[in-house]
């Protein structure tokens, strides 16, 4: 259930038109309210692309950029891990991801802060939508 900071889908948009890439056609439907989750799609090469939501309802309400500084080498505030971390976009704490000790997931469960940025690939994840989101 959900990734939360690993393997973002920033390449899922067609840069020339800002439209979803052909393999992300289902994401277009998701953005129109037909689904609230990112949709993994299999392209003709057999690879799976994670297609982010194009319109997360939490992004406008919960991102607090004032005072935000990003240090991609910042350790997890709970365990000190320096790999696979992410930053809460509400309170700016840095915690480790699900593939380490799940401290960001724990932070979300305790605070209901939904939006995070993964340091490994600079992807954005919304816990409430259980989906990557387009930045």
Image (cartoon, grey):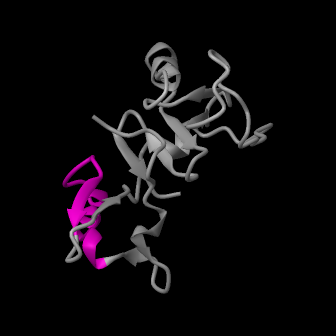
Quick check: is 23 in the magenta stretch? yes
User: For this rendering, which residue is in front, 42 or 110?
Assistant: 42
Q: Where is residue 98 in the image (x, y as percent from the top left)?
A: 43, 29
Q: Is residue 134 above or below residue 17?
A: above
Q: Which residue is drawn at 62% across and 16% down?
A: 79
Q: Nearer the viewer, residue 12 or 134?
A: 12
* Residue toward you, 91 or 98: 98
Could you say which quadrant of the image residue 87 lies in? top right
Left or right of 86? Residue 30 is left
Q: Is residue 18 left or right of residue 48?
A: right
Q: In which quarter of the image is the N terminus?
A: top left
Q: Where is residue 93 shown, x and y percent of the image?
A: 67, 26
- In percent of width and height, residue 39 lies at 25, 55
| Count of numbered badges drawn on the protein | 0
x and y, in percent, of residue 11 in the image: 46, 69
Q: Which residue is drawn at 46% across and 23% down?
A: 102
Above or below for 120 versus 127: below
Q: Determine which quarter of the picture holds residue 33.
A: bottom left
Q: Residue at x 60, y 40 (%)?
A: 63
Q: Is residue 33 magenta?
A: yes
Q: Which residue lies furthest to the bottom in this view?
A: 16
Q: Which residue is drawn at 55% across and 53% down?
A: 121
Nearest the viewer among 91 and 102 is 102
Q: In this view, does 57 lie to the left or right of 116?
A: left
Magenta stretch bounds: 22-42
Looking at the image, is 21 positioned above or below residue 106? below
């Amino acid at each position: 259930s959900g990734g939360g900071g690993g393997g973002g889908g920033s390449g899922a948009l067609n840069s020339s038109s800002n439209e979803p890439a052909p393999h992300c056609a289902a994401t277009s439907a998701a953005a129109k309210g037909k689904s609230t989750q990112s949709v993994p799609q299999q392209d003709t090469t057999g690879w799976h692309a994670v297609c982010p939501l194009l319109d997360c309802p939490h992004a406008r309400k919960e991102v607090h950029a004032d005072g935000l500084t990003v240090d991609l080498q910042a350790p997890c505030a709970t365990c000190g891990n320096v790999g696979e971390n992410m930053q809460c976009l509400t309170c700016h704490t840095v915690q480790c991801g699900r593939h380490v000790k799940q401290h960001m997931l724990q932070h979300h469960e305790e605070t209901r802060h939904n939006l995070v940025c993964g340091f490994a690939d600079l992807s954005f994840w919304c816990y409430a939508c259980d989906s990557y989101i387009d930045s």
